[in-house]
Amino acid sequence: MPTNDETLLLHLNEAIATIRDKDQLFKVVTTKLRLIFPFDLIGINVFDEEVKQKRLFLRDYYGVDEAPPLPPGADYFTPIAGSPIEKLVADPRVQQFTPQQYLADYPEYTAYKKMTHLGVTHLTAVPLHIGGRLTGFMTLASRRTPHFTAADEKLLEKIGSLIAIAVANTLAFEEVARREQERTLQLNITNALLSIKQREPLFRAVAEALSRVVLFDYFGLRVQRAGRQEAFEGFAEFSRSGVGADAPLLALDPNRQNGLNRLDASAMYHQLNDLLSEPGLYAADDFRAQAQRYPLLRHVYEEYGTRAMLIVPIWQRPDGAAVLMLASPNPTAFRPEDLATVLALTPQIALALENLFAFEQIEELKAQVEQERTYLVDEINTSARFGADSGTFIGSSPALQQVERRIGMVAPTDTTVLISGETGTGKELVARELHNASPRHARALIKLNCAALPAQLIESELFGHEKGAFTGAVERRIGKFELANGGSIFLDEIGELPLDLQAKLLRVLQEREFERLGGTKVLHSDARVIAATNRVLADEVAAGRFRADLYYRLNVFPIELAPLRERREDIEPLLRHFVQRLSKRLGKPIRQVRPADLAALQAYSWPGNIRELEHVLEQSIIVSQGQFLEFAGFAAAPLLLAAPATPTAQAAVPIKTMKEQERDHILAALQRTGGRVSGAQGAALLLDINPKTLEARMKKLGIKRMVGVEG
């Protein structure tokens, strides 16, 4: 018959071999053990490989009505040095002692103080060995004095070896389960990575997967790029019902300010950089100590009742950082195993973030390419009226050659260019030639006429707007500067830009950064700025209508275009070019120009410059029926036909001043439109100038609007 000792060993062996659940296994083990060795408390501490750290693996009370709860962090690894366990490690054998014996050397050791309070008088320590290696200690505590014989001590040594194997198996099973959970988490995060392309849904999917293995109340991902703090959406809230949108991790966002000015809040956030750059688990007293050190943590400690935080950096790179944070009001919410679990998932989370950024960048590039395609189609359909099909300027006058030389000098650089000249002189063509001859020619030339939009819409056109930024903003819109990134932006009629927008344009020129209307994210644009104006900006600066600092930023490399009246030798080649191109487009035969008409065209002052010349020729091509182009019957015809046919007659006709010719030309246009200035049938459209500009010139020339006529 087997003895009681042998029966106990058999039962323990059977339990260890068949039971995998930790709680059930050690319930059986302790129950059988108490049949031979009465005790009121059992505790098992396990050691790390180097026998430097200890962790409470098991603690059970028997016959104690008010067993104290485990202190915070009791099941974490803590140093053996400085605790009574170091005496046991120094002499690893079955031994008996009283709490008072150890409290004499370790008066602050809380566990033994509590045992004394519970009436425990004797402790029996049993070493746990596997293959001769010390893996921990089992401690039996009793309110009565145990009387162990040498045989009992031998039996306890054998039991210690069996329990050491049981503990090792349990730890191995827990490790296998933990790794299986990690694989499941990695799979879930990978699935989210492959299927979710928006920030908040992705963050929530990662948080939900993580919540299955780590107990937390708040989850947050914070990304900082290019030295700016980006408070991402996707702060998700778990395990707490009825809690509003505000959460402790959101309170760490410097942009929320928490009653502080932005500068102070930002400074407080940067104080956290050291804490956020290293993995860490801060709970109970540790978190309170960090809260005393960092004002923002003190804020979440006091205002939100946060008592534990787990921090895991996702990456630390020269271009920025990313960090994952978990928080809870429970001081025992996180264990070291939780920190290890999140650290193991860091590569997956980093990959998810990188792919998210890639998806967002792809979407932005797709939108930009689509916008560029739209602009390029428009560019093709509304290309400059002269030189667009040949790719060269038409004419050989010294003034035109000077313009070509200056384009050749400045095009290879990124220097800002200011093109000035009267309306219709070809400022847009010069801008296009500058762009096409520059290293940026592979990207689009984005154009904006500052006089063509109401003041309240120009800012949206220049810098874009977010959804809901103003009434009618039903979706996010990319602005011209964002679209022109890497290319060029042509700001026509820059003198018409309102003063408040001039300051914002100055910021783009100086810092190359801006914000969308209604947005807070700072955007950057590497766009080469080409501006044009038909005003004398120096006079506008003197009159207080244009900022002097912006003028000097724009006028880095000026190009001035001469009016057509100062390059009359270019009229004939321009005429041939337009007649050939317009006749083909209109489906008309190419007709010749009478020498007398050519002389009249060359003698005319052309206040509308090349644009006016093209319009006159287009009208002539449409109505002409015979061998020659006919110019009679048009607004410019009285002036053209008034030009003498011979040099002798020309000398007899008095030459009008520029103001007189311009006045006659505007009067002819008004006569043709019945006095209407603006609108689809107005003189401004006929003369191809801004209606306000036309009204200003009419006022300057003393031309009164016809009474009773809208315009």
Image (cartoon, rainbow, N blue to C red):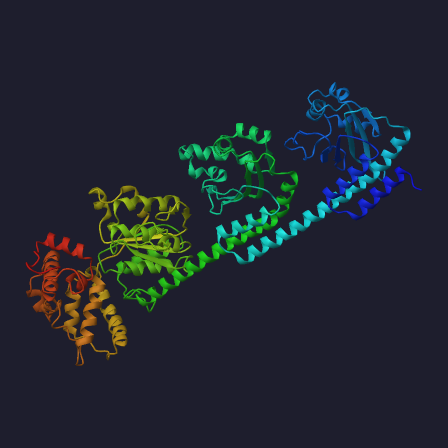
Count of numbered labels shown in the rendering: 0
Instruction: Decide: is 687 above or below 303.
Output: below
Relative vertical location of residue 679 with respect to residue 93 in this rendering, above or below: below
Residue 710 percent location from the top left of the image: 11, 60
Which residue is at a point 41% across and 51% down the rendered structure image?
526
Q: Tell me the quarter of the picture where residue 70 sits.
A: top right
Q: Quadrant of residue 75?
A: top right
x and y, in percent, of residue 554 in the image: 31, 48
Q: Is residue 628 above or below residue 45?
A: below
Measured as percent of width and height from the top left, residue 231 is found at 46, 43
Task: Determine the residue located farthest toward the right in the rendered image.
Answer: 1
Asked if residue 485 shows in the view, the reply is: yes
Left or right side of 167 for 245: left
In x, y percent, where is residue 665?
12, 62
Q: Is residue 669 left or right of residue 202?
A: left
Could you tell me which quadrant the N terminus lies in?
A: top right
- Residue 411: in sight, yes or no? no
Q: Nearer the viewer, residue 277 or 423?
A: 277
Q: Which quadrant: the C terminus?
A: bottom left
**Between residues 377 and 533, which one lies in front from this camera angle?**
377
Which residue is found at the position 7% from the left and 56% from the top? Answer: 704
In front of the other: 292 or 683: 292
Q: Residue furthest top?
A: 104
Q: Who is closer to the viewer here, 555 or 491?
A: 491
